[in-house]
Amino acid sequence: MQRTPEAGKYEKEMKVLQQLYGDVMKEEELRKYLEGSNGNVQMMIEQINTTLSNQKTAIQGSMEENKIEQINDNTLKKEDEKVKIGETKPGINLQGYCINMDCLAAKAKLPVWVNIGFGDISFESNKTSFRCPDCGQSTVTSIVKAMIFNSEHSISSSENLTPVKGNHYQCFYPIKAGLSYELKSKKIRQHATSLEDLITRSENAMMSNEIINLVAELQKYLITVVKPPKVKDSARLLEKIKCDYSGDYNQ
């Protein structure tokens, strides 16, 4: 017949073990360890510490693997976001998809940028073909986005005939399938009527809210911006315009 533990046996040792490990192990587990070590508390503590240490290492290893996988996933996503096929330059830039199945961009289903430059163009979003910067074929037919870069421009569509105009550094416009578009782009000019008008425009620009806010933001990072109170005198300015811009003060 199997002997049962004597009542009250190892109670003192159990109290010590419960104080040490009661928050991570059940009483039944502690008693099993204690009886297995014949009441040798020191031996039992070493066994429990080894077991808990192994469990902790396994958990940390699993967490580290998950962390590495997450980092790799994020890295891949970031790299995918950075993929840019084609070059954007001043003027009109169109983003679309190449349909040439021998093209690497088409195989990867990546959008490509096609630079048109300055000028006027008309196209249908899913019918007009443009030259792919990757394979060199006129197989970019599905245009999804237009980006007007560093130019005065206007854009209109068969859905909205009223042109949207702008002269910002960079403007993005979504292109809808099935619509026709007309884009116009030209170099940004000052539109000054005279040299004196150009000076007045420049001085007003230096006092604009945009420049004031920009200077204030730069000063937060201890960047000093020197703003002359006045533009160069007319004679020096005219000399520089003749030298740098062939006398055209509207550039």
Image (cartoon, helix red, strand yellow):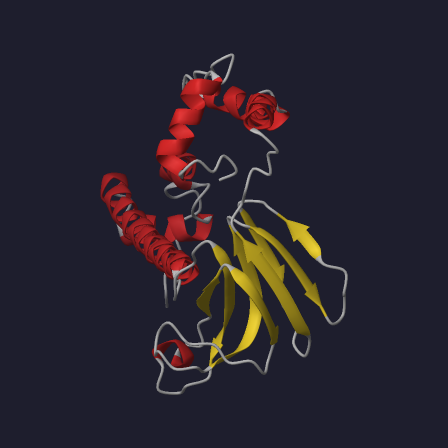
Q: State the image coordinates of residue 201 (x, y, percent, origin top left).
A: 60, 27
Count up the numbered dots.
0
The one nearer the camera, 251 or 100, is 251
| Residue for point 77% across, 60% down | 162
| Residue for point 47% across, 77% down | 130
Q: Is residue 250 above or below residue 81?
A: above
Q: State the image coordinates of residue 106 (x, y, percent, origin top left).
A: 42, 80
Q: State the image coordinates of residue 41 (x, y, percent, origin top left).
A: 28, 40
Residue located farthest toward the top when viewing the structure as drawn: 229
| Residue for point 37% across, 72% down | 133
Q: State the image coordinates of residue 25 (x, y, percent, origin top left).
A: 43, 48
Residue 210 in the figure: left or right of residue 31: right
Q: Is residue 17 above or below residue 122?
A: above
Residue 111 in the figure: left or right of residue 65: right
| Residue for point 46% across, 41% down | 23
The one nearer the camera, 81 or 201, is 201
